[in-house]
Image: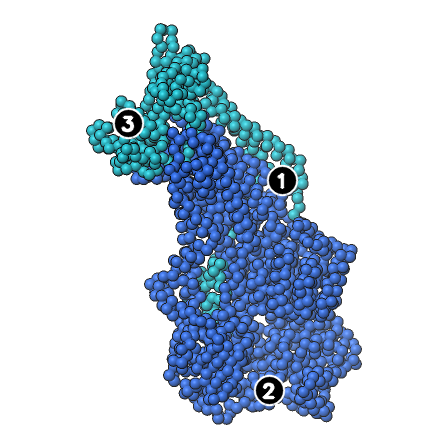
Chain colours: A blue, B cyan
């Protein structure tokens, strides 16, 4: 710990700097003296809150900002007034110190780990250019204005201005997954003047000055100016490398540090997340306030009683008991007595409540972390509760908002089926009724691609007849795969011979090109003007004439290539709806069979594309190319003119076939959704994807089914249209004759209080699909309620093309108006807003980006774990927390209210019934552990039952287990117990004597009797409440009783009395009192009377109005295993007539980049020049080295070949 | 694709042997402290895998505890357990109640109020504060003889020995013979801490208000003058009180010397070392004093005053007949509407007369039995609907 202390102190010196806000930032390269003037933050980051010196004061200050802690401090001060003090000082200070200490230890541990991780990051090495040479420095020593060198796969240490890189044009590739969650690579480029500063000597002389905006958190924006050699160069985000990015595919690069440490965009974005509170928390706070009001009432009643008593009796009793000197009137005595009673009655809200709740939630979070059924073996990621304060809210979720890509789907595309000239190939996954993949014995072996040395080993296809067709030389099949290998914008990379890596913009394209690769049409490399394909082992280089790029309107892309024989051919792939209209109509039969196949594929939820080609003659092409050139040079409406030129050539094409790509769902998604739906959880999918894709996924994950009465699609572009569409949807729902859905007839048992409209009672099977445009209108203030009402009446809601902000807005809308608990689950940076907005945010971990995980409260790696998180962990947490709170309030009322009754018999003098030690220890020793054990370990039904009967989740959603009503019942029970606890001993003791004739009703014996019966009664009660007696529960319950008696006898022992006679006045009391049969008879009687009605009531409820969980427990007891017929799983199979209108999901514009050759490496270009000759790693390395050491811009071969 | 492959490889290397210790998670487990940014995550996300890095095993342990599969007993309130319980409680409580009730009824007890508020009472004259010392005599008749040991109590009503200020107004150190506390009593004793610049021993309101009436009992026999009943004044306090809790200060030859430098409580006539003639019943260990110092829980209470020991098996301790009670009336209670009583009582295994307990047991036993019957009926009537309630 010495080392830690050292670093703590060290960091304090390094990191703690307060500066005035900047107006603009100036940083001069290689000039530390100049830059030091501005006192910019160093690159040392500090996420920790304390150091060794500040820990105690800062932490205590923070803790006393909690109202509860301050309240107890106030009580403590109150007790120092002798006239008021009704308890000894330690009865308050011991719990308070305990609570403060526990919290402090927790905070310190957290902070220690933050220090550790800070240290680790701060001490990462980076190469800094200092006085003309590169030196290894830890990150924290990097300053603004330094030039640092990054190498491939390194993290960017600070926000840098890219100066130069190993790649031509000062390009470099980065991955921004840490920042925004996007997994594709991004290109950054140095400005031309600096991109030539390749070697150290020139960089060392670089003295440009950057003037730019002050630090901010906008990840996609940067504006600044570089002043160098008397000229100005504008800088944009394109020139920046941000901290947190990783350098990829770039040997090295140099950058100038502009923002460091806390000023970097990453750190600027990492503000504290909004502290989420659960509904139980809020309820608890309300209740605590009520209890406080109740406390004041009690205090007032007793104070009035005291004033009256002192006035009537006390005044005349002064011969024996004179008033205190300061007290001169009955009224003043009453006033003091009020405070005295506030002190002794404060135990109705014990300080241990908040700590216990935290401990229980912590336990629940650990159970989530430890759950091996939520551990993803493939990604080696366990589930993680990143927030420990929300666990019981997991049991109350009503709305789940899910992202699509990466959450429901794997974002992995698999080439699943294809139709080649009227014949369908490929075997899809066969689903049985429950949605499980059937393990069919006759399933064929995957196709063996060993004939092809360039095949991708991971590619799997299940129909070998297609490969046979290719091997047989079927011209259609050849043309089919040729198209796939040519018509795309994929880039290839070949590090070693035969090890091809495809960099595709969309996974769809990657899947298609990989399929072609495995079937013997290997896309090997490309230049701006050529594409080299290995066709069945022979290299063929096509001349690339044009790429007619994809866009959302065209929904297709084409390439025009000239083959080695000189024939020009257009290859086109695109969405079926678009492409089928542009085909040559001649082979009608082929068209119809292909259409059938397309329908079949779409019915299985596959993404389809139609492939076609067209031969162009040289003459026509020449004219067309001319027209295209003109169109592209046009000043106005260039887009439209280009589109019409493209349209012209993409007509009368010959159909080749169709492909079907499976957008692979995450494992278990349909089952999870079905189960959650049965648990009355509404699932909304919010996706940035296109409507077709989203609907498609909706079908394949069984959110939408053909059983549904109707799927409303809202696509209006104006306010009026949207309003009209929503209105129509509602009308349809109300009119519909089959208001009760088919398939599942689970009765809607929702309380009417929660339903603002009749619509939701119409439990029809409807779904709503709304797109981003319409959503923007629907979310406007005057329509949001209408939208919400419509949407909530639907079983499934899909919002497509939504922005991250809209995602959050939708969540906020439901949160605000439905008063329901919402959960948002997502994996990407675009889900962060929604994850933060929802009551519970869940991040999918194990993906490339971690932004969502960082913002989330819970994270795991598979969507299917959601069912376990909610139905098992959430349900248990809710149940446990509710049981805990009920019992906790009960036991404290039972404990405290005895003082109230005793007040009437002791002149309202605030005399306690119990020994002071008993009051101190009751909450923290005698009764804390059993209830904690129940709060942590209790289970009503085993986990598999809560999956089997999803309806068990309902009590949480309806807030049935702990609400104001339940609270009053607990309190009533507590008060009832306290009445008996006081009046039964009172009745017995009033005139009784011991068996040796001495007085029985002395104060101390009375105190011991009441305390003992209280401990026994609350122990019996916790025994009744505990539904799951593990060894730990046994140990704690019996242990608490044992500890009670042990402490009782110890406190009443002679030894302690001899040492502190004034502190342990109860000497000899325990053995004298507890030896009396009368006392035990009283305790037994009290226990029986307290517990009997509870048992009777619970038994009655169990036999007259059993909960589902009771019934499940009971049925388990009698071993009547219910058959699965009760599970109302929806029918899953579907015969769809839907046509998939899906096209591939990538952005346009990549084609242009390819044609310009800007993003191509020297190596690949050189390679292309050598034709089919392969390059080897060492050759490339050698070339690289040469250029590095030469460092001259005149190195000829490095000049990129411009198209 | 390439990157993905790399990642998998790296993580494979990071993963340690299966038996390795579970690693502490990087992220803070306490949510309230959750930060959006955690530097450690930056490390985890990256592809770098330090070759000598610590072996990590993130797979949760498959233990019953961590997987919440601890073997457990899951009790359910079924008709088979609840109804018998009610019947058994009924069947146990009713006989106990009857037993207690009978025992209690067999106890002889007589209570004589000698406050003197009633003008006809012989003690009425003592109400005036001037009449000190005041003697009065009350005649009474025992209809039945008292057998076995008989206990004589004094009872006070409306006397708040349980008042907070009263209860704390004592110094147990002093009473335990601590010499420093003897001369410097606790502040709790105020205003009975010092008198005329001398510490009061015993200090405090409790001691100061010690009951000081003297009661004597005489049997009016056949003979011309009545027989005094021998009253034993030792053995009326708890053993622990007499031997542990209360001790006379040490040092000095006589008790008087040991209490040197202290003064008597304001209300007392005699100092504490003159409470009794017997040395082992004098000073702080005077049993009357100890009994008084054991404060009562309720404003109406009785305290043991004297023992009347059984003489032989043949004769009753107090034969039926006429008796009279001689009272030295010192203790004023009239001002606060208090009452004073003298009680004679025999005793059983469960102490003195206690009708409440017996009746309560009988009542609760009956209720329990009745509840059992009611529940049985209800359960029988509605069983069909409950036990076969289908699970939907």
Q: Looking at the image, is A1126 positioned above or below residue A709?
A: above
Q: Residue at x 40, y 20 (%)?
A: B127
For disc 2, the chain is A
Mark number displayed over residue A1156? 2
Q: Looking at the image, is A841 positioned above or below residue A1142?
A: above
Classify mark 1: helix, strand or loop. helix
Which quadrant of the view contains residue A817?
bottom right
Distance in Å between CA atoms under marks 2 and 3: 117 Å
Q: Considering the image in quadrants, where does the C terminus of chain A appear?
A: bottom right
Distance in Å between CA atoms under marks 2 and 1: 79 Å
Q: Which of A494/A904 is in front?
A: A904
Question: Alpha-carbon neighbours of circle 3 within 10 Å: few (<14), some, or many (≥20)?
Answer: some
Total marks shown come to 3
Which quadrant of the view contains residue A1?
bottom left
Question: Alpha-carbon neighbours of circle 2 within 10 Å: few (<14), some, or many (≥20)?
Answer: some
Task: Tell me if I can see residue A1048 in this picture.
Answer: no
Tag in front: 2 or 3:
3
Distance in Å between CA atoms under marks 3 and 1: 71 Å
**Residue at mark 3 shares a chain with residue at mark 1:** no
Which residue is the site of mark 3? B271
Left or right of A382, for residue B307: left
* Residue B175 coordinates in the image, percent (x, y): 30, 33
Mark number displayed over residue A1103? 1
Tag in front: 3 or 1:
3
CB within 8 Å, label 2 to label 3: no
**Residue at mark 2 shares a chain with residue at mark 3:** no
For disc 3, the chain is B
Q: Earlier in the sequence, mark 2 or mark 1?
A: 1
Classify mark 2: helix, strand or loop. helix
Left or right of B82, for residue A25: left
């Amino acid at each position: 710990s010495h080392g830690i202390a050292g670093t703590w102190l060290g960091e304090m010196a390094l990191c703690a700097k307060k500066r005035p806000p900047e107006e603009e930032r100036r940083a001069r390269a290689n000039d530390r003296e100049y830059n030091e003037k501005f006192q910019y933050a160093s690159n040392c980051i500090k996420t920790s809150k304390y150091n060794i010196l500040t820990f105690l004061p800062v932490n205590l200050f923070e803790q006393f900002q909690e109202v509860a802690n301050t309240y107890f401090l106030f009580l403590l001060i109150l007790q120092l007034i002798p006239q008021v003090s009704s308890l000894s000082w330690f009865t308050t200070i011991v719990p308070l110190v305990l609570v403060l200490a526990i919290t402090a230890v927790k905070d310190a541990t957290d902070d220690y780990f933050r220090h550790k991780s800070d240290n680790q990051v701060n001490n990462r090495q980076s190469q800094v250019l200092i006085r003309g040479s590169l030196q290894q420095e830890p990150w924290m020593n990097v300053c603004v204005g330094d030039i640092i060198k990054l190498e491939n796969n390194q993290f960017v240490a600070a926000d840098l201005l890219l100066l130069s890189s190993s790649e031509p044009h000062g390009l470099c590739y980065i991955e921004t997954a840490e920042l925004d969650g996007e997994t594709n690579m991004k290109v950054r480029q140095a400005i031309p003047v600096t991109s030539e500063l390749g070697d150290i000597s020139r960089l060392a002389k670089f003295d440009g000055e950057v003037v730019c905006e002050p630090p901010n958190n906008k990840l996609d924006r940067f504006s600044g100016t570089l002043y160098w050699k008397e000229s100005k160069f504008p800088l944009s985000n394109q020139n920046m490398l941000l901290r947190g990015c990783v350098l990829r595919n770039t040997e090295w690069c140099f950058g100038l540090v502009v923002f460091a440490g806390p000023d970097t965009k990453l750190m600027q974005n990492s503000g504290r997340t909004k502290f989420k509170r659960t509904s139980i928390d809020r309820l608890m706070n309300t209740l605590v306030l009520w209890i406080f009001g109740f406390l004041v009432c009690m205090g007032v009643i007793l104070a009035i009683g005291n004033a009256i008593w002192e006035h009537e009796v006390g005044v005349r009793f002064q011969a024996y008991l004179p008033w205190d000197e300061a007290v001169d009137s009955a009224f003043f005595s009453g006033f003091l007595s009020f405070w005295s009673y506030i002190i002794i009655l404060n135990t109705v809200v014990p300080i241990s409540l908040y700590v216990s709740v935290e401990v229980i939630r912590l336990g629940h979070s650990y159970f989530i972390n430890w759950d091996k059924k939520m551990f993803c073996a493939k990604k080696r990621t366990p589930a993680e509760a990143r927030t420990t304060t929300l666990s019981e809210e997991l049991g109350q979720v009503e709305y789940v908002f899910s992202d699509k890509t990466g959450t429901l789907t794997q974002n992995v595309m698999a080439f699943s089926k294809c139709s080649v000239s009227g014949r369908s190939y490929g075997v899809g996954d066969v689903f049985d009724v429950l949605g499980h993949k059937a393990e069919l014995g006759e399933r064929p072996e995957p196709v063996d691609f060993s004939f092809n040395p360039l095949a991708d080993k991971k590619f799997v296809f299940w129909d070998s007849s297609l490969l046979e067709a290719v091997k047989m030389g079927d011209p259609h099949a050849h043309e089919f795969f040729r198209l796939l290998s040519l018509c795309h914008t994929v880039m290839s990379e070949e590090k070693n011979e035969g090890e091809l890596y495809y960099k595709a913009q969309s996974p769809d394209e990657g899947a298609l090109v990989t399929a072609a690769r495995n079937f013997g049409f290997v896309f090997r490399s490309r230049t701006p003007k050529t594409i080299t394909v290995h066709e069945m082992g022979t290299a063929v280089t096509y001349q690339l004439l044009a790429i007619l790029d994809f866009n959302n309107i065209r929904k297709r892309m084409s390439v025009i290539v000239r083959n080695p024989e000189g024939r020009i051919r257009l290859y086109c792939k695109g969405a079926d709806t678009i492409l089928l209209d542009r085909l040559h109509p001649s082979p009608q039969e082929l068209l119809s069979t292909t259409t059938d196949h397309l329908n079949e594929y779409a019915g299985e939820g596959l993404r389809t594309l139609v492939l076609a080609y067209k031969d162009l003659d040289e003459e026509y092409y020449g004219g067309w190319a001319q027209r295209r050139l003109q169109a592209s040079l046009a000043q106005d409406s260039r887009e439209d003119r280009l589109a019409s030129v493209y349209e012209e050539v993409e007509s009368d094409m010959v159909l080749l076939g169709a492909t079907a790509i499976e957008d692979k769902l995450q494992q278990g998604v349909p089952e999870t959704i079905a189960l959650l739906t049965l648990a009355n959880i509404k699932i909304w999918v919010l996706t940035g994807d296109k409507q077709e894709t989203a609907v498609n996924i909706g079908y394949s994950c069984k959110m939408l089914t053909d059983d549904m009465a109707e799927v409303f699609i809202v696509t209006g572009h104006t306010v009026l249209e949207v309003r009209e569409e929503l209105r129509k949807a509602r009308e349809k729902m109300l009119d519909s004759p089959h208001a009760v859905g088919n398939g599942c007839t689970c009765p809607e048992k929702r309380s009417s209080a929660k339903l603002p409209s009749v619509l939701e009672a119409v439990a029809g099977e409807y779904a709503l699909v709304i797109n981003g445009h319409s959503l923007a209108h629907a979310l406007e203030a005057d329509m949001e309620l209408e939208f919400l009402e419509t949407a909530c009446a639907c079983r499934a809601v899909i919002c497509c093309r939504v922005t991250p902000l809209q995602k959050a807005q939708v969540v906020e809308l439901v949160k605000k108006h439905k008063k329901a608990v919402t959960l948002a689950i997502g994996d990407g940076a675009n889900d962060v807003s929604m994850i933060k907005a929802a009551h519970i945010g869940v991040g999918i971990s194990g993906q490339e980006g971690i932004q969502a995980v960082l913002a989330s409260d819970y994270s795991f790696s598979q969507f299917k774990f959601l069912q376990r998180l909610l139905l098992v962990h959430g349900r248990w947490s809710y149940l446990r927390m509710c049981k805990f709170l009920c019992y906790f309030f009960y036991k404290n009322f039972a404990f405290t209210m005895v003082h109230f009754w005793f007040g009437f018999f002791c002149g309202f003098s605030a005399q306690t019934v119990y020994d002071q030690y008993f009051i101190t220890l009751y909450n923290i020793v005698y009764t804390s552990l059993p209830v904690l054990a129940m709060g942590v370990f209790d289970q009503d039904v085993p986990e598999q039952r809560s999956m089997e009967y999803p309806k068990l989740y309902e009590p949480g959603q309806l807030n049935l287990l702990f609400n104001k009503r339940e609270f009053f019942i607990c309190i009533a029970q507590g008060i009832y117990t306290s009445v008996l606890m006081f009046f039964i001993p009172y009745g017995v003791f009033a005139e009784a004597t011991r068996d040796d004739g001495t007085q029985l009703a002395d104060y101390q014996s009375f105190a011991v009797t009441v305390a003992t019966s209280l401990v026994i009664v609350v122990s019996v009660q916790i025994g009744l409440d505990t539904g799951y007696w593990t060894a730990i529960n046994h140990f704690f319950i019996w242990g608490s009783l044992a500890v009670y008696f042990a402490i009782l006898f110890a406190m009443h022992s002679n030894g302690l009395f001899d040492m502190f006679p004034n502190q342990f006045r109860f000497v000899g009391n325990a053995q004298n009192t507890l030896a009396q049969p009368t006392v035990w008879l009283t305790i037994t009687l009290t226990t029986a009377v307290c517990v009997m009605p509870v048992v009777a009531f619970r038994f009655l409820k169990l036999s007259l109005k059993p909960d589902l969980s009771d019934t499940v427990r009971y049925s388990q007891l009698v071993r009547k295993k219910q058959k699965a017929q009760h599970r109302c799983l929806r029918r899953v199979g579907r015969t769809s007539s839907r046509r998939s209108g899906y096209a591939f999901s990538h952005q346009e514009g990549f084609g242009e980049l390819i044609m310009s050759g800007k993003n191509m490496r020297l190596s690949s270009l050189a390679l292309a020049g050598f034709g089919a000759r392969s390059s080897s790693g060492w050759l490339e390395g050698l070339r690289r080295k040469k250029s590095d050491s030469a460092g001259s811009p005149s190195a000829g071969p490095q000049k990129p070949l411009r198209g | 694709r390439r990157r993905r492959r790399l990642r998998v490889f790296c993580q494979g290397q990071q993963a340690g042997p299966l038996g390795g210790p579970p690693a502490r998670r990087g992220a803070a487990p306490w949510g309230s402290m959750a930060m959006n940014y955690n530097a450690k995550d930056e490390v985890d996300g990256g592809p770098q895998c330090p070759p000598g890095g610590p072996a990590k095993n993130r797979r949760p342990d498959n233990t019953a505890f961590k997987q919440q599969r601890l073997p457990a007993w899951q009790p359910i309130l079924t008709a088979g357990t609840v109804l018998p319980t009610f019947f058994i409680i009924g069947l146990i409580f009713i006989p106990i109640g009857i037993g207690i009730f009978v025992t209690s009824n067999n106890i002889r007890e007589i209570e004589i109020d000698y406050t003197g508020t009633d003008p006809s009472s012989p003690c009425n004259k003592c109400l005036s504060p001037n009449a000190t010392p005041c003697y009065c005599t009350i005649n009474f008749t025992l209809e039945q003889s008292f057998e076995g040991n008989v206990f004589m109590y004094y009872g006070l009503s409306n006397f708040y020995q349980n008042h907070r200020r009263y209860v704390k107004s004592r110094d147990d150190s002093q009473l335990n013979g601590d010499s420093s506390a003897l001369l410097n009593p606790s502040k709790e004793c105020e205003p009975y801490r010092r008198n005329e610049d001398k510490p009061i021993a015993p200090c405090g309101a409790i001691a100061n208000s010690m009951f000081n009436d003297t009661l004597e009992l005489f049997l009016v026999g056949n003979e011309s003058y009545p027989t005094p009943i021998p009253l034993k004044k030792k053995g009326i306090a708890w053993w622990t009180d007499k031997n542990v809790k209360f001790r006379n200060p040490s040092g000095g030859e006589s008790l008087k010397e040991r209490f040197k430098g202290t003064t008597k409580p304001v209300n007392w006539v005699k100092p504490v070392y003159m409470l009794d003639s017997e040395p082992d019943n004098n000073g702080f260990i005077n049993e009357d004093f100890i009994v008084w110092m054991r404060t009562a829980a309720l404003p109406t209470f009785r305290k043991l005053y004297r023992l009347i020991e059984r003489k032989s098996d043949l004769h009753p301790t107090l034969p039926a007949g006429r008796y009279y009670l001689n009272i030295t009336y010192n203790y004023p209670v009239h001002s606060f509407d208090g009452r004073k009583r003298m009680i004679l009582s025999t005793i059983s295994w469960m102490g003195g007369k206690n009708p409440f307990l017996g009746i309560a047991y009988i009542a609760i036993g009956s209720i329990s039995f009745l509840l059992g019957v009611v529940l049985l009926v209800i359960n029988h009537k509605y069983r069909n609907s409950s036990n076969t309630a289908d699970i939907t």
